[in-house]
Image (spheres, rainbow, N blue to C red):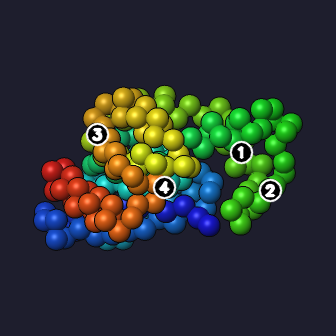
């Protein structure tokens, strides 16, 4: 189990020149430094200002954290049923820091105390309120894991955000939903190049 957050960047001035870089991060936020490192090293002559962040579920939260780290230098942000509820979920589960275990298993992943402590004072929507990049959010109205209200609040918090709700879709879209999302996402990328 890991978190997928991706960077889309263009190698030239056309959509056909889009390059894909996958940033695979374990459920822990310290790996965000690898995003800045990738651009600092500049292996492929990428420009952070011409790049798009894309993240689904926990990767959506990680993408938001990465955008905050880059201080709005990314071209645009695309979120797919972003798990903005994670902070609330874990803080509700562990009301006091003394309740946090040294480690626990969750979805076949061993989570440590540092993971839970990193979210203790995190204000997700305060962070989102600083975002000034165009943001496209996809969410299914039948998502049993991340309630739609989190994406609705994100749309109202991020200055340039648009939420697209897919009827009948859950946390992970059907083939039809994915195809529709891919088309809309490509159009969003074209508009923001």
Give the labeled residue for mark 4.
171
Quadrant where the image shows the C terminus: bottom left
Left or right, 86 with reference to 142: right
Q: Residues within 10 Å of mark 1 (few under 14, many from 20)?
A: many
**Foreground of the two, 72 or 4:** 4
Look at the numbered discs 1 and 4 and tell me whether their residues touch, using CB distance below 8 Å: no
Residue depth check, mark 4 versus mark 2: number of the one nearer the observer: 4
Residue 66 x, y percent position in the rendering = 46, 49
As drawn, the residue found furthest toward the left would be 14
Q: Secondary structure at mark 3?
A: strand
Q: Residue at x 62, y 39 (%)?
A: 87
Give the labeled residue for mark 1.
116
Q: Residues within 10 Å of mark 2 (few under 14, many from 20)?
A: few
Residue depth check, mark 3 versus mark 4: number of the one nearer the observer: 4
Look at the numbered discs 1 and 3 and tell me whether their residues touch, using CB distance below 8 Å: no
Q: Secondary structure at mark 1?
A: helix
């Amino acid at each position: 189990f890991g978190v997928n957050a991706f960077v889309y960047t263009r190698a030239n001035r056309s959509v056909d020149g889009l390059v894909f870089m996958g940033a695979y991060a374990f459920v822990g936020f310290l790996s965000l430094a690898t995003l800045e490192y990738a651009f600092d090293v500049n292996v492929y002559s990428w420009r952070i200002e011409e790049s798009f962040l894309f993240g689904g579920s926990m990767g959506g939260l990680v993408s938001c954290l990465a955008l905050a780290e880059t201080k709005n230098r990314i071209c645009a942000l695309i979120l797919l049923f972003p798990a903005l509820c994670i902070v609330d979920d874990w803080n509700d589960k562990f009301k006091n820091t003394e309740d946090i275990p040294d480690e626990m298993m969750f979805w076949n992943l061993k989570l440590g105390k540092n993971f839970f402590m990193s979210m203790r004072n995190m204000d997700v929507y305060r962070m989102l309120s600083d975002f000034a990049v165009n943001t496209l959010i996809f969410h299914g109205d039948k998502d049993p894991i991340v309630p739609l209200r989190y994406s609705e609040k994100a749309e109202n918090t991020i200055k340039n955000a648009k939420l697209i709700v897919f009827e009948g879709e859950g946390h992970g879209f059907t083939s039809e939903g994915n195809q529709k999302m891919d088309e809309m996402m490509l159009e969003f990328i074209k508009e923001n190049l």
